[in-house]
Amino acid sequence: MNATRHGISIGIERTGNHFFLSLKAIGKLTHEDYQIITPMIDSALASVKQPNVDVLIDGTELEGWELRAAWDDFKLGLKHNNKFNKIAIYGNKNWQEITAKVGSWFISGEVQYFDNMLDAMNWLNE
């Protein structure tokens, strides 16, 4: 039996009113993945009153989304869009860079794509 690996791992750090959220997406994301991760992100960001969240998304193992999961991702971004300061998307596929550009239209903070993890971290820490 060959199981297909997919999902999102999440890390949350807080310093005072500043949050650092790290996400690693693996495989092709499903609606069920978002049913698990969305309440965690909602809970973590519930007390954020101003854009004090920096996000690192590691998409190097991301293969994409099922259609309903893509809609879930879009809704999650819109729900919390005014809480993000910077979002660094670290990836290795051309479509991820395009996704970052499109995503920046809907997020109040800055969104940048990187093909190097160190560059992404340095930009977040500026």
Image: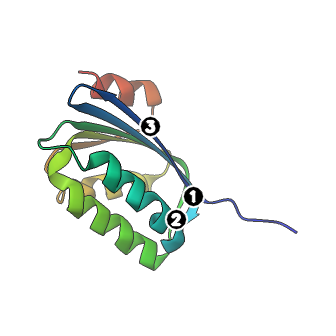
Tell me which amino acid carries mark 2.
Asp
Residue at 18% x, 47% y is 83
Left or right, 111 with reference to 40: left
**Dots 2, 1 in contact, CB < 8 A:** yes
**Dots 3, 1 in contact, CB < 8 A:** no
Q: Tell which tag, 2 or 3, sits nearer the viewer.
A: 2
Q: In the image, is residue 50 above or below residue 107?
A: above
Quarter residue 103 falls in: bottom left
Number of other residues with Cα within 10 Å of mark 3, as a class: few under 14, some 14 to 19, many 20 or more: some
Number of other residues with Cα within 10 Å of mark 1, as a class: few under 14, some 14 to 19, many 20 or more: some
Residue at 57% x, 58% y is 7
Write down the residue under mark 2: 33
Q: Position of residue 99 (x, y in %)?
A: 34, 58
Per the rendering, the mark at residue 115 is 3
Residue at 19% x, 54% y is 81
Tell me which amino acid carries mark 1.
Gly
| Element under disc 3 | loop
Q: Nearer the viewer, residue 73 or 89?
A: 73
Q: Position of residue 112 (x, y in %)?
A: 28, 41
Q: CA distance from mark 2 to mark 1?
A: 6 Å
Residue 102 in sight in this render: no
Q: In the image, is residue 15 above or below residue 100?
A: above
| Residue found at the far right of this picture | 1
Tell me which amino acid carries mark 3.
Asp
Q: In the image, is residue 118 above or below residue 7?
A: above
Q: Nearer the viewer, residue 120 or 3?
A: 3
Q: Position of residue 51 (x, y in %)?
A: 15, 41
Write down the residue under mark 1: 7
